[in-house]
Amino acid sequence: MSVASAPSESGTRTAVPAPTAEPAGATEPAGLPSTTETTEATGAATVPAPSAEATGAAEPAGVTDPAGTAPSAEAAAATGPVVRDAREFGVYARTGGWAFALRVARSVRPGGQAAEDSPKVSAKAFAELAGCSADRVMRFYKAWDMAADDGLVPQFEALVPGEDVALPEADAWPAYYSSRSGAASVRGQAITAAAAAEGIRPTKALEVAENPTALRAAILADPGTAEAARGALLDRMKEDPALQTEMARAIARTDGLKKAVATEAKAADRIGYVRQIAEKGQIRTPAGQTVEAPAALRAEAERHLSLIDELDDDEEAGQWAGEAYDAVKGLVAEAVEADPELRVRERRTRFYSSLQKATKVFEELTLDDVFEEDVYEEDMVRRLEALQEAVAGCISALRRASDAR
């Protein structure tokens, strides 16, 4: 029987009993590895221990502390099965799944190696001997392969069946091994990478991804989970235009959400107006001009903005934004009226804006169907004549004003 060894805290090596065959589809080891086997005669489960032939030493009667200190009276009096259980537990506590991965790594042929060139067997044959699935064997194989690429363990070619090597600590195992076959897919690899970036075990993220109904239930029932999901969706939408479109479409089709978005957008615009004055020192007049803000106006904008920024995340900013906008807008109007030159430019800009709008509307009138009987009405002519008189009066007023200057 082959054994693997792992360094203990004191630097000594501890024998690792070879794992026995396990039924196909068995669950992954979560704590102490399963090493039980059933006798044919009684059906009772027994825990195999390394033989003297395999270890090169007789089975000790008691437990030796890894640090070399004398065991307690209770530990020294422990029986053989208890001793073996404790040793197996200690080895797994220090090495975790590396003890199992070593058996796969030193006994399974690397890809591309011909059978006649190696005493090792294929993953399929190893799985048959182990009584488990080839997929499970390959998960241990791939974990060792990734660790070898990182220099944590020897490459497959350097391992010989039955040979023991020093194994890494158990804490390193979860970073390389996943008990879920979905982790090998492109989707699984992306989830694994994202989990690593968040500092969590990939198996947790993969489990959630494989059970969206459970995720939905947690979001519906727990505000904390819902908040985490909201933040994740916002982060995802920054780099996913398709998701942005889908979310916008879903919101637009839901009356309550559509109204809420409109309200928040209005509040955000108002806060942006106040923020521009406070941070950039510029005001935008009602006519659309951008000019430097007076010091008093900027100070007032900063005061309102500080109140808004101090709000908690769960506080509504709409009312505060409305008050800040109304106060600052009133001060902007006063600043415009207090500056004669700015007041004239403002009125001129407003007049040009209205004139451009009126011109565009008149130019959009179509006369193609004016002679159609179902289009013409006498009221149309009267309205145009009134418009003509208004335009003529406007022209006369402008000319008189020009002559007066």
Image: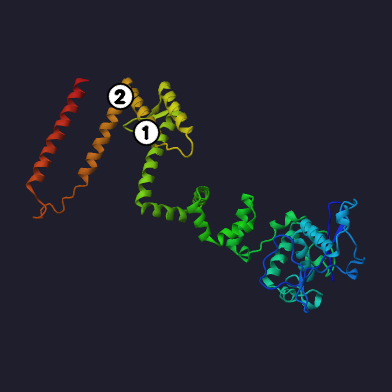
Q: Quadrant of residue 120?
A: bottom right
Q: Residue at x 35, y 23 (%)?
A: 335
Secondary structure of residue under mark 1: helix
Secondary structure of residue under mark 2: helix
Q: Position of residue 353 (x, y in %)?
A: 27, 35
Please, what is the three-letter code of the amino acid marked with disc 1?
A: Gly
Q: Residue at x 40, y 54 (%)?
A: 250
Left or right: 280 as drawn, with respect to 351: right
Q: Which disc, if any, is residue 322?
A: 1
Query: Residue at label 2?
Result: 343
Q: Is residue 24 above or below residue 374?
A: below
Q: Residue at x 41, y 35 (%)?
A: 271
Q: Position of residue 68 (x, y in %)?
A: 90, 52
Residue 151 visible in the displayed image: no
Q: Quadrant of residue 291?
A: top left
Q: Is residue 92 above or below residue 387?
A: below
Tag 1: Cα neighbours inside 10 Å, few (<14), some, or many (≥20)? some
Q: Residue at x 62, y 55 (%)?
A: 193
Q: Position of residue 366 (x, y in %)?
A: 18, 50
Image quarter hosting the C terminus: top left
Q: How many tags in the picture?
A: 2
